[in-house]
Image: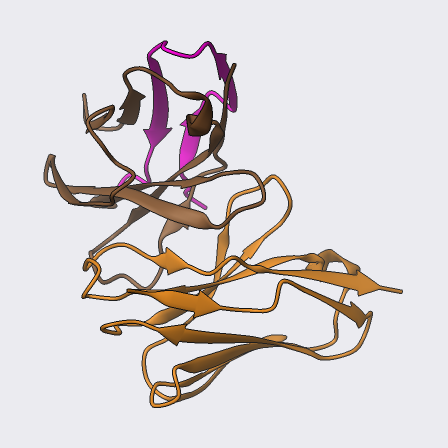
Chain colours: A brown, B orange
Amino acid sequence: EPEVTQTPSHQVTQMGQEVILRCVPISNHLYFYWYRQILGQKVEFLVSFYNNEISEKSEIFDDQFSVERPDGSNFTLKIRSTKLEDSAMYFCASSKTADSYEQYFGPGTRLTVT
Amino acid sequence: GQNIDQPTEMTATEGAIVQINCTYQTSGFNGLFWYQQHAGEAPTFLSYNVLDGLEEKGRFSSFLSRSKGYSYLLLKELQMKDSASYLCAVRDPGAGSYQLTFGKGTKLSVIP
């Protein structure tokens, strides 16, 4: 069964450093998402992406964040200058269409900012 | 604003039935979702309701009442592997067509 993959599974970085989290969505999906989950808290929407541009973004997704689809398979989330409060699990998800009833989540990248 | 409420924790016995409730207040509504999340893992899709009524899928059923802003997830014949967090999520066109807004999740512990 096709699945969303994410790398790395765990990333440790120092405050102020740039990180890039990578995702490979399911191949025939057209909509891509990033969510984050701070330890012990709820899953929060960050951004959605379609047709090579951002469709929606939340208040969390400020100028420090950016997304890109550099080739036909990868979907990346960049945090330019990490802060301690960026420490969280970051989930990539994809869906076939915007109103698909199912978004498929990847296994997540645990980002630890020290 | 949006508000999605569900109990923080529940405990149930193996083989029993448990009902996890979710209430929501959103400016719009375009579907309610239930996801299962084991500790340290990704959420996995369980069910979707957009019309009132009960959707059954094996041991799992989900119910929706749009007029009451209420849903529940029913798990039958509980197994130890059902110990997980259960996340209620709503798609609210007022917040954005694509995104899911999640509740804080209900941590279910299944005991022998």
What x and y, as percent, mark residue B8?
62, 62
User: Which residue is located at x 28 percent, y 21 percent?
Assistant: A78
Quarter of the image with the C terminus of chain B in it = bottom right
What x and y, as percent, mark residue B30?
26, 72
Whether residue B57 is visible here, answered yes or no, is no
Residue A34 located within the stretch drawn in magenta:
no
Counting labels gives: 0
Q: Is residue B20 above or below residue B86?
A: below
What x and y, as percent, mark residue A83?
40, 20
Q: Is residue A60 left or right of residue B84?
A: left
Residue placed most toward the observer, B59 or A43: A43
User: Which residue is located at x 51 percent, y 44 percent?
Assistant: B42
Q: Is residue B14 above or below residue A4?
A: below
Residue A10 located within the stretch drawn in magenta:
yes
Q: Which quadrant holds residue B31?
A: bottom left
Q: Which residues are magenta?
A: A1-27
Judged from this view, the residue extending furthest toward the right is B112
What x and y, as percent, mark residue A67?
22, 28
Quarter of the image with the N terminus of chain B in it = bottom left
User: Which residue is located at x 18 percent, y 21 percent?
Assistant: A70
Q: Is residue B45 above or below residue A44?
A: below
Q: Is residue A52 left or right of residue A102?
A: left
Q: Is residue B91 left or right of residue B42?
A: left
Whether residue B93 is visible here, answered yes or no, is yes
Q: Is residue B8 left or right of residue B53?
A: right
Residue placed most toward the observer, A68 or B66: B66
User: Which residue is located at x 43 percent, y 67 percent?
Assistant: B4
